[in-house]
Amino acid sequence: MTESYGIISCIPIVTMLALVFKTKRLFESVLVSCAIALIISDGTGFVTALIDHIYKVLANDTYAWILLMLLLFGGLIRLLEESGGTLGFGKLALKYIKTEKRSLLVTWVLGIIIFIDDYLNNLAIGSAMRGISDKYKIPREMTALTINATGGPVCVLLPFSTWAVFIFGTMQESGMPMAADATVLTEYVKVIPYIFFAIVMVLAVPLLAIGVIPKFGPLKKAYERARSEGGSVFPDGLTQPIEEAGESDDAGTEKQEPQLRDFLIPMLLVIGLTVYTSDLIFGVLAGIFSAFLLYIPTKKMTSSVFFDHLFEGMKDMLYIGVFIAFAFIFVESVNHLGFSDFVIESISPYLVGGMIPVITFIAIAAMCFFGIDFWGIMILTFPIIIPLSLQFEINAYLSVGAIVSGSVFGGMACFFSEQMLMSSTSCEIRPNDQAICLFPYAILVCIVSAVMYLIAGFVL
């Protein structure tokens, strides 16, 4: 049984957030906070505890899947770029994208189209759109923000995504009243209208793109930097030059005229086979294999150059792979202190009547933002919130929507969540660069959503 340290369990979380805002160094902040959590729980044996946690994470099926997916997708993205396929997509897109607003709206539309999995969404769109966004002097933070905000939020609003399947299964296991022949399509669609945070966020992104919602705070400063004379689309401290979409690159391997098919065929295979098999790994492997069949016979690349690029792309993902490992360790060490139990025990006395949906949303949003695994949080809270809602005659689908909304907020806004890391990596910026710009808007949407849950809890 996990020992509860009460309010002391909050110290690592508070330390991590303070260090991130002070130093803007995310990995180091997580590492220090992880050490603090282990020192609290294990004292002088914290080094041994850290090693044990590392072994545990490396043996974790979820982490193994994420790492494999990252490596394979990193290799595929590098191949698409080196073949000129990404530029082929960019040349086509530039025929229709003539303004900054259109560039961001196309990024938003792609986020809706690639709805199957938020990881696929976050990694693929950055590669396709960052060069086009650069052409119109859109800061990379805005591009990453747009991708992130249409990843998880879109996935939970459709009944045939990985999120929907997981949530439906958890609803069944938690005693949700439903017909014997209930399916994802018949039941999950009843939850979708109540996932307020995702709905508001997906609608807010195009409004931010076209200027109805103003740029302020860190995002405004990012725009001022990008638009200033000699300014860069990259955050301060990052100077990597990115070729604008549509420009040719004569360096390196013998590249031919960029062809849209070199991008489109592998990506369509990834999406199509992921839908058909419900396995993203299978889809990405098929995309890599199709790239081999496309690029080698047409002499886009030799086989040795193909595999060089494949492994270089994998290497690009090593940082995020290591970071996610330590994020897992941090979450595990904080949970070991009883942080999630402390939060749940603290709010349980207030989970009554019409307040259930709004308190559920706020509590889960906070826990997920602080790094507690949102899949685990949903598994933990569904069996608590659903019976409570039925007992107080609250719409159970509304309460499920509140749980999902809180999880989406945390997964999207947490400074070290997989979605934040992947969308930032695909735009070649640091996670904290995006997180600081996204945070004020995520909080605004969170406040709007909380008001909606408060009203709905008493009206519905």
Image (cartoon, grey):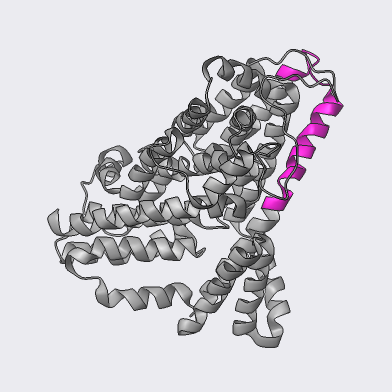
Asked whether residue 193 appears in the rendered view, the answer is: yes
Q: Residue at x 41, y 44 (%)?
A: 153
Where is residue 115, by image quadrant?
Answer: top left
Q: Is residue 318 magenta?
A: yes
Q: Residue at x 35, y 63 (%)?
A: 362
Report the predominant secondary structure element of the magenta stretch: helix
78 lies above or below 67: above
322 lies above or below 232: below
Compare residues 40 and 55 and report the one nearer the observer.
40
Residue sitting at the far front? 229
Left or right for 430, reference 7: right
Tell how many labels. Answer: 0
Left or right for 154, reference 136: left
Task: List x then y, in percent, for residue 284.
Answer: 62, 34
Q: Residue at x 76, y 34 (%)?
A: 310
Task: List x then y, in percent, for residue 420.
Answer: 56, 50
Q: Is residue 268 magenta?
A: no
Compare residues 92 and 171 and report the one nearer the observer.
92
Compare residues 179 and 347 and report the one nearer the observer.
347
Asked whether residue 65 appears in the rendered view, the answer is: no
Left or right for 91, reference 379: right
Q: Which residues are magenta?
A: 294-320
Residue sitting at the far bottom? 44
Left or right for 297, reference 367: right
Task: List x then y, in percent, for residue 147.
Answer: 52, 39
169 lies above or below 273: below
Compare residues 289 and 196 and report the one nearer the observer.
196
Q: Residue at x 84, y 18 (%)?
A: 254
Task: List x then y, in percent, for residue 136.
Answer: 59, 28
